[in-house]
Structures are given as C-alpha cells and as structure tokens.
C-alpha cells in the first residue's frame, strides 16, 4: 500500500514540476507531544520523502531536539532534481493538561540544507527558520492523538550554481493535521498538510518550484528516562 501511494505521489509531482527545478520540499511537521519531564519522542516517517527526528523534554514545559529530512530521485522520471536534504535543530514550550487531555506546543527551529541536480549543474544551499504553534487532543488512555499545526517557514537560498541568479528568500505557511494511534508508547503516525507561499515569489528565479503537499506515514515512540512516580 505504501509503495503504491509513493508511486502516485511521485507521478503527481512529476506533472506539477515539469520544466522546473524543485527548490523546496517541505519537511514533515514535528509535533512530539511531550507530556512530562524526561520524555523522549522518536519519529520515523516517509512516503516519497523520508525523515527521522528525536526530541527530549528537559523540563515539564520545555523540550529540544533535531530532525533530518531527505529525498533522492536518482535520475528517475520523477522530480527534475536529484536530491533534497535539510537538518534542523528544534525546541520550544509544551503544556499537557491531563484533566482535559488537551496539548499545546509552541516550537521553532533553525536548519540548513542543500537541494541539487548534478545532471543540470544545479545546486543551492539554504537556511531555514520556522515557528509553529500546535494544538492537540490526547485520549484518556493516551492511545489516540490528534494534532493541528500551523508552521510558518522562512527559507533563504544562497551559493547558487546558476548563472545570473542572486540569493533570494521565500516564506511559506504550512497547516497540517497529524494522527497517531496504537499503544501508549508506540503509535502509527499519519500526517497530511499543505505548504504554500505566504507572499509572492517575484524575487525567485523563473524556474523556482516547490512541493505544495506534506504527507507522511510512519511510527512514533514515546519513552521516559525517569521512573513513574509511585
């Protein structure tokens, strides 16, 4: 099933970006949903892009972590570019109300990455910054989670191997829905969202293209390094 969905996604993307260079693939939304100090959230997901993340709750309301997202087409008939990768350091504030089962998270991140197509002598380094509020509902037994997130990303492109193209920046607004279901500590993870330019892209090169979809299927594990209180 996952392989079929992957082929469909790649086929749709190939129609969207014919003749363009895909400068931006939106990383998966990170919503670790920490509940208490000492929590560790590990997430692996993919579809046509893959990502892995780790996050640690160093206090009852603060967390820090990192994530990596990558894509490689290996000169197939999908996207015109061959690879896209970005590494991001993340962190923020979270609050979990065990009485109402509501979860609030306000996070941000700073990342760096590269997108390129060696066959067309195309390679661009970029920096990425984002802020993201998320609201969630967690079931009584912590087996079902629903999260709504709104990420706002600022991406700065530089060091381009394309003639007469100056560095430029683009902003994106990225709403997403994340569902998790399973046991208290290990859950199936499904994510759907959009990634759309917040402003016009008039300062971008004419071949600039971006993926407007965020899609992921994977597994999330939540552990705690401390023993539970008696």
Image (cartoon, helix red, strand yellow):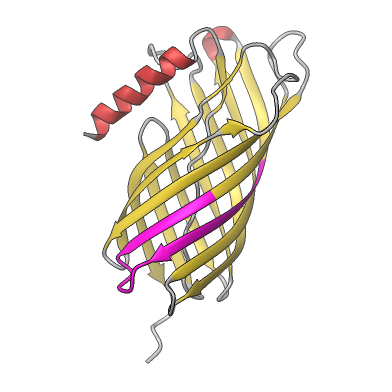
**Residue 144 position in % (x across, y down):** 32, 62
**Residue 70 position in % (x across, y down):** 48, 34
- For image coordinates 42% across by 13% down, the residue present is 15
- Is residue 200 rendered to the left or right of residue 61? right
| Nearest to the observer: residue 192 or residue 39 | 192
- For image coordinates 48% across by 19% down, the residue present is 82
**Residue 117 position in % (x across, y down):** 54, 15
- Is residue 179 rendered to the left or right of residue 111? left
- For image coordinates 47% across by 59% down, the residue present is 32
Check the picture and name the quadrant holding the N terminus: top left
Above or below 152: residue 92: below
Q: How many marks?
A: 0
Chief secondary structure of the magenta portion: strand
Q: Does the magenta stretch include residue 134?
A: yes
Taking the view exactly as shown, the residue that stands out farthest to the left is 1
The region drawn magenta spans 129-149
Q: Is residue 140 magenta?
A: yes
- For image coordinates 33% across by 74% down, the residue present is 140
Taking the view exactly as shown, the residue that stands out farthest to the bottom is 230
- Is residue 158 rendered to the left or right of residue 101? right
Above or below 94: residue 160: above
**Residue 5 position in % (x across, y down):** 29, 30
| Nearest to the observer: residue 129 or residue 147 | 147
Check the picture and name the quadrant holding the C terminus: bottom left
Above or below 224: residue 154: above
């Amino acid at each position: 099933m996952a392989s079929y969905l992957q082929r469909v996604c790649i086929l749709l993307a190939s129609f969207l970006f014919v003749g363009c260079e895909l400068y931006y693939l939106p990383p998966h939304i990170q919503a670790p949903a920490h509940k208490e100090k000492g929590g560790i959230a590990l997430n692996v997901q993919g579809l046509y892009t893959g990502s892995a993340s780790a996050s640690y709750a160093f206090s009852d309301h603060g967390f820090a972590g990192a994530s990596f997202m990558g894509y490689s087409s290996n000169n197939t008939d999908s996207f015109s570019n061959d690879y896209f990768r970005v590494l991001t350091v993340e962190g923020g504030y979270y609050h979990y109300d065990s009485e109402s089962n509501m979860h609030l998270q306000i996070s941000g991140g700073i990342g760096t990455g590269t997108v390129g197509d060696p066959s067309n002598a195309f390679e661009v380094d970029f920096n990425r910054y984002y802020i993201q509020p998320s609201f969630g509902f967690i079931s009584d037994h912590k087996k079902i989670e629903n999260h709504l997130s709104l990420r706002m990303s600022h991406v700065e492109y530089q060091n381009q191997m394309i003639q007469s193209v100056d560095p430029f920046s683009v902003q994106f607004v990225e709403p997403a829905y994340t569902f998790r279901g399973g046991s208290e500590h290990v859950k199936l993870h499904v994510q759907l969202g959009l990634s759309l330019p917040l402003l016009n892209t008039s300062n971008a090169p004419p071949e600039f293209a971006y993926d407007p979809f965020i899609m992921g299927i994977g597994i999330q594990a939540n552990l705690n390094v401390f023993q539970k209180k008696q």
